[in-house]
Image: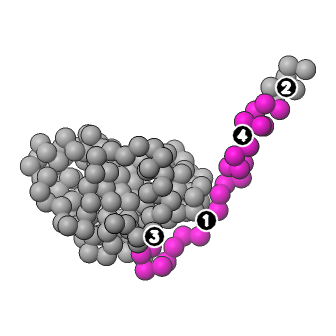
Amino acid sequence: MLDRKKYVLVTFHRPRNVDTKENINNLINFLNNLGTLRKVVFPVHPRTAKNIREFGLAGKFSGNVVTTEPIGYMDFLALSKNAELVITDSGGIQEETTFMGVQCLTVRNNTERPVTVSVGTNQLIGTNLLEVEKAAKLVLEGKVKKGSVPELWDGHTSDRIAEILIKKLS
């Protein structure tokens, strides 16, 4: 059972983070350390699952790290919305957490979604898991990043597009 705002949701699938035994082992250690602070929910991407198996690391997760098969989009959004913190190397999740006002740590050195960092609740931490762990602890201690929903992320994009098309066709 998960308590609302009392768990951390994580996703990892980028080659930089999951394609070597050392990186997967470091990732598992990071998640186990995080699991001492909060329950961790880890829907495991097929690429990541394959590497965990191939490197013989499947049994290394602590009991507070809940690994699952990949989760459907709507269920994942519900998990994200109710998480205290999301840690990811995904692009789209940065946008979704910003829109929902959920704290997000991005485990990458760059992002195609800079507005999620400059305006939203996302923090671009880099790939050093020790730095990610420090940032996660700060969030879990209540030192959260204040953010807002970026301008024009109001759900009316299709209305604006329709207006533009109507003007061009008139």
For marks 4 and 3, give the CA distance. Answer: 30 Å
Which quadrant holds the N terminus?
A: bottom left
Task: Give whichever of 69, 137 is nearer the camera.
Answer: 69
Q: Are marks 4 and 2 in contact (CB under 8 Å)?
A: no
Q: Position of residue 6 (x, y in %)?
A: 41, 72
* Dot in front, 2 or 3: 3
Q: Residue at x 45, y 70 (%)?
A: 5
Q: Earlier in the sequence, mark 2 or mark 1?
A: 1
Answer with left or right where residue 27 lies relative to residue 86.
left
Which residue ends up furthest to the bottom in the rendered image? Answer: 141
Q: Position of residue 45 (x, y in %)?
A: 30, 44
Answer with left or right where residue 84 lies relative to residue 17.
right
Q: Earlier in the sequence, mark 4 or mark 2?
A: 4
* Dot in front, 3 or 1: 3
Q: Residue at x 43, y 80 (%)?
A: 141
Disc 2 marks a residue whose amino acid type is Ile
For marks 3 and 1, give the CA distance. Answer: 17 Å
For marks 2 and 3, give the CA distance. Answer: 44 Å
Which disc number belongs to residue 147?
1
Q: Position of residue 133 (x, y in %)?
A: 33, 69
* Mark 1 secondary-structure assignment: loop
Please name the residue that numbered disc 3 is placed on.
Answer: 5
Please name the residue that numbered disc 2 is placed on.
Answer: 166
Q: Is residue 124 above or below residue 133?
A: above
Disc 3 marks a residue whose amino acid type is Lys
Q: Earlier in the sequence, mark 4 or mark 3?
A: 3
* Dot in front, 2 or 1: 2
Region in magenta: 139-163
